[in-house]
Each structure stands twice: as C-alpha cells, then as structure tokens.
Image (cartoon, rainbow, N blue to C red):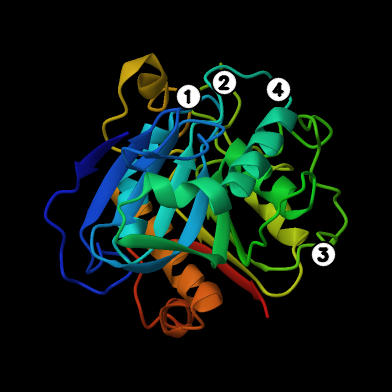
Amino acid sequence: MASVSSPAISTSTNVFEYGNFTTDLIKVEQGPCWRKAAEQTLPPPKPLLIGTPSEAGVFPVLLFLHGYLFLNSFYSELVQHIASHGFIVVAPQLYCVAGPDSTKEIESAAAITNWFSEGLQACLPSHVRPNLSKLALSGHSRGGKVAFAVALGKAITSLKFSALVGVDPVDGMDKGKQTPPPILTYIPHSFNIDMAVLVIGSGLGEVKRNPLFPPCAPKGVNHEDFFNECQKPAYHFVAKDYGHVDMLNDDTTGIRGKTTYCLCKNGVSREPMRRFVAGISVAFLRAYLEDNSNDLEAIKDGHLVAPVVLQKADFLL
C-alpha cells in the first residue's frame, strides 16, 4: 500500500475548484491492508486507487468505476478533486483486458462494495473514517453502464447506495448493438432505481474523430438514453464542446493513455471538462448524501457558472 500526497490545494469552496481539504492518493494492491503491523484484514477483491482527505474526519464514500480498457490512474486528478471536498473516492482497477461482456465487472463492483464494511477502514489512515451510510456509485463510459447495472440490482450488494452518477455512460456500439448484459430498455422512465441520479454527457461524444472509428459515445446508447429511462429525481448536464474522455488526466501514459487522444473526438483542453465533472459530482453528492443542495441549486439556476458551456441541462424533479 503506497500513499502519495497531493500538490498544494486551493482554499476555494467553489465546487469547480479544489476544495479545502488536502488529499492523499493511496494505491492498494490485491493483497491485505494493514492499519497496524499486527492487524491484517481481508484484501480488496481488486487493486484500488483511493483518494481521501488528509485531515481527520468521517467522510462519505464514492465508488468510481473506470471506462473500457482504461486504467484507474487515468482518473487520479478527478479523484483528488472530489476528495478535496470531503469525500473518500475508491477507484478499483476492474480488469486489465476485457471483452464485450461486462458481467464480471458488475460482479466485481458488487464484491468491492460488499468488502467495504470489513476492509476499507484498514486501507485508510487511522484518523480518516468512511461513513458507509452515505455511499454513492459512479462510473465513466462502460463503467457508467456497470454503475447503472449495480444500481438496478444486477448484482447483490450488502450496502445501500444513496446516489448514482453516470459520467458519459455507454451501453454498446449502437441501438440494437448493445453489449451484454444490455441495460437500456428504451422504455421511458423504466429504470427502477431507488436513488437520485446524475447523468453527465459530452457534446462531442457522439461525433466521429475520423471515418475509421465509430464515435466513442454513439447515439442510441449514450447519456441521452440513460437519462430518458431515469425516474425522479434525476439531473442531466451536457458539456457542449468536450469529448468522451476529456475528464481524464492531461498526461495518460503508455499505449492505452496515448489512445485516449486518438480514438475519440476531443475538446481543446481536458482541464475544464475535468473540473466540470468533478464539480457537478460534488454538488450532486452534497445534495443527496449530505442534505445540502445549495451548490446544485446554484448550478441549476445559473448562479454558479460552470467551467464549460452547457449544451443541455434537464431535470426530473
């Protein structure tokens, strides 16, 4: 288990900027965690990247699931931004190689959730405690699909989630070409999800980067379709001039990292979209985990300006 401190953090309380907490980024391999040398606990089902406030306290927990064939480390800046506002963010590495079927990812996400009660505390600094009664679920791209699947009960969890965030979720290549197990039913408001939902979309996600590759978030299986099947309360924000992977770190290393700049239509810069995804997630989580809707209402009403131009903002309330 390795811990890396974050850079200097701004004292701003604007959700689109880093928050008041400094953060630690903890890497946990698929082995036992120790809080003390003699205190061994159950190992996590998958390797983890955990963003946590450095200061003492009891904090809500967000389980964040990576996109198809991506590394959890590609989201470290997003994870730290959310953590700096007083959340423990757990980002597992669900697999290294995977085919079209996401069933095992759904099962792994549930297994990690079930492990939280017995194992998460030992992977954190002793003065940082997770509040598992305030638990949220999020995922990007195919990870967003997996998050919806878990929320829909496709795998059993011992803990209850109170909020769901889909970051540009995708359910296959096209309508009629969903990857197994299909999540979208194309029946409006059919999702039987007993929690509030935030769906974040990218305006360029459904645009091809070049004729050789399909769009990364095709029409018929993207954020629009996920939101259309949500019930109240649900929120849908779409960033106009940004692409499907623009919330990743600027520097995504290795061959996989390089492909994030080649396969999808991208915006001019990742930083504004990353700040937007982190900030709108924080505002939503504050509203539905901490009963503080001030930031979410300010964004919804246009009083708190996002770092991106919004193409769409829809609400089911």
Would you say 236 lies left or right of 316 here? left
**Quadrant where the C terminus lies?**
bottom right
Q: Earlier in the sequence, mark 4 or mark 3?
A: 4
Which residue corresponds to mark 4? Answer: 100
Q: Which mark is residue 213?
A: 2
Distance from disc 3 to disc 1, alpha carbons, whole Å, reads 32 Å
Front label number (3 vs 1): 3
Q: SS for tag 4?
A: loop
Which residue corresponds to mark 3? Answer: 189
Q: Nearer the viewer, residue 236 or 196?
A: 196
Q: Earlier in the sequence, mark 3 or mark 2?
A: 3
Would you say 291 lies left or right of 187 here? left
Circle 4 residues within 10 Å: few <14, some 14–19, many ≥20: few
Circle 3 residues within 10 Å: few <14, some 14–19, many ≥20: some
Distance from disc 3 to disc 2, alpha carbons, whole Å, reads 31 Å
**Quadrant where the N terminus lies?**
top left
- Tell me residue 207's x, y (percent): 55, 37
What's the residue type where badge 3 is placed?
His
- Tell me residue 216's x, y (percent): 57, 33
For the image, the number of numbered tags is 4
Q: Residue at 41% of width from left, 47% of height from top? A: 122
Q: Earlier in the sequence, mark 1 or mark 2?
A: 2
Distance from disc 4 to disc 3, alpha carbons, whole Å, reads 26 Å
Front label number (3 vs 2): 3
Which residue corresponds to mark 1? Answer: 263
Q: Residue at 47% of width from left, 24% of height from top? A: 263
Would you say 10 lies left or right of 239 here? left
